[in-house]
Image (tube, rainbow, N blue to C red):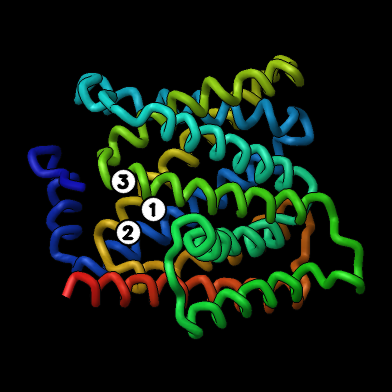
């Protein structure tokens, strides 16, 4: 992020930004990404009263592609060369499943609950790396994963209350995202981030069109504005998240990802009169702490391997 050569205000902002430490820049990027994600989630929840979530998924991807186009025009299409097209197709297919399940969950379940349960995605990823890639975890990481799923039980309280469909859909989305992360790790060994993103955006728009046509109805004028907001905020959130993780240590910026539950609680209360239960807060804290520890241990192991 460099604004040199622009107007005086942009130059002043650039000087201020460059003067910050890498950790500070990473934290700011992460915090702003959580705000953008929360705006997108709230807009999906609001619009789902008018449009089917599967149609919202399509427009989120379509408008996300439009946001990505300036980068394509600047870089050309040479970055789309690949020898791993089937893996890109698999990644997009899993991503569409995850996004569809997550948007449907947002349409029927309180925002804070959905965001809390979504923190299980890194736990699913960790388990899947063992089952599919043969990685080995020691007792401490297994304990963290176990307590993470205990946190899930705290939120869901099976046997005490019935588990709503939206919670099941959120867990399905988290599982599908866990599988997606496995594919992304594999692609990252040979493909640039621009290539991975380009194929993701292209295939997501194509794959989500069919389900959208099945439930299609033309949006009203106001709905178009909300759909544009969903596409822009979602794409910006993804870019800022990636930049945050690139700028600073994961263990420095990741704790601020918990702000998604805070923003979701505030917006859910103000716009939809949703009040998170103490079980949602407690479970979210347990899941997030467990996911953070798993990420921390993975980073420590990677450093030892580099050494």
Circle 1 SS class? helix
Q: Which residue is mark 3?
A: 188
Q: Position of residue 249 (x, y in %)?
A: 29, 68
Asked whether 292 or 181 is in front, the reply is 181
Q: Are marks 1 and 2 in contact (CB under 8 Å)?
A: yes
State how far apart marks 1 and 3 are (Cα). Answer: 17 Å
First in residue order: circle 1 vs circle 3: 3
Q: Position of residue 229 (x, y in %)?
A: 53, 34
First in residue order: circle 2 vs circle 3: 3
- Judge whether 177 appears above or below 196 on screen: below
Q: Which residue is mark 1?
A: 241
State how far apart marks 1 and 2 are (Cα). Answer: 6 Å
Q: Residues within 10 Å of mark 3 (few under 14, many from 20)?
A: few
Q: Which residue is mark 2?
A: 245
Quarter location, residue 5: top left
Q: Which mark, residue 205?
A: none
Asked whether 252 or 277 is in front, the reply is 252
Circle 3 SS class? helix
Q: Position of residue 77 (x, y in %)?
A: 24, 19
């Amino acid at each position: 992020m460099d604004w040199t050569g622009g107007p005086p205000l942009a130059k002043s902002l650039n000087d201020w930004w460059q003067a910050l430490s890498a950790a500070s820049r990473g934290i700011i990027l992460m915090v702003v990404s959580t705000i953008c994600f929360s705006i997108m989630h709230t807009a999906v929840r609001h619009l789902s009263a008018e449009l089917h979530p599967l149609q919202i998924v399509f427009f989120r991807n379509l408008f996300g592609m439009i946001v990505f186009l300036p980068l394509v025009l600047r870089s050309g299409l040479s970055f789309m060369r690949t020898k791993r097209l089937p893996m890109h197709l698999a990644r997009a297919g899993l991503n569409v499943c995850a996004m569809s399940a997550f948007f449907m969950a947002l349409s029927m379940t309180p925002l804070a609950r959905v965001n809390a349960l979504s923190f299980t995605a890194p736990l699913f990823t960790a388990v899947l790396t063992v089952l599919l890639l043969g990685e080995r975890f020691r007792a401490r990481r297994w304990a963290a994963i176990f307590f993470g799923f205990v946190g899930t039980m705290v939120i869901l309280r099976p046997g005490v209350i019935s588990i709503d469909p939206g919670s099941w859909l959120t867990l399905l989305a988290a599982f599908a995202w866990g599988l997606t992360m496995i594919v992304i790790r594999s692609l990252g060994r040979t493909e640039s981030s621009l290539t991975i993103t380009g194929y993701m955006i292209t295939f997501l728009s194509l794959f989500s069109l069919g389900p959208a046509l099945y439930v299609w109805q033309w949006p009203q004028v106001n709905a178009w504005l909300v759909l544009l907001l969903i596409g822009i905020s979602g794409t910006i959130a993804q870019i800022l998240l990636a930049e945050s993780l690139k700028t600073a240590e994961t263990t420095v910026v990741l704790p601020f990802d918990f702000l998604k539950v805070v923003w979701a609680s505030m917006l859910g209360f103000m716009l939809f009169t949703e009040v998170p239960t103490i079980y949602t807060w407690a479970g979210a804290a347990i899941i997030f702490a467990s996911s953070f520890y798993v990420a921390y241990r993975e980073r420590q192991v990677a450093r030892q391997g580099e050494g």
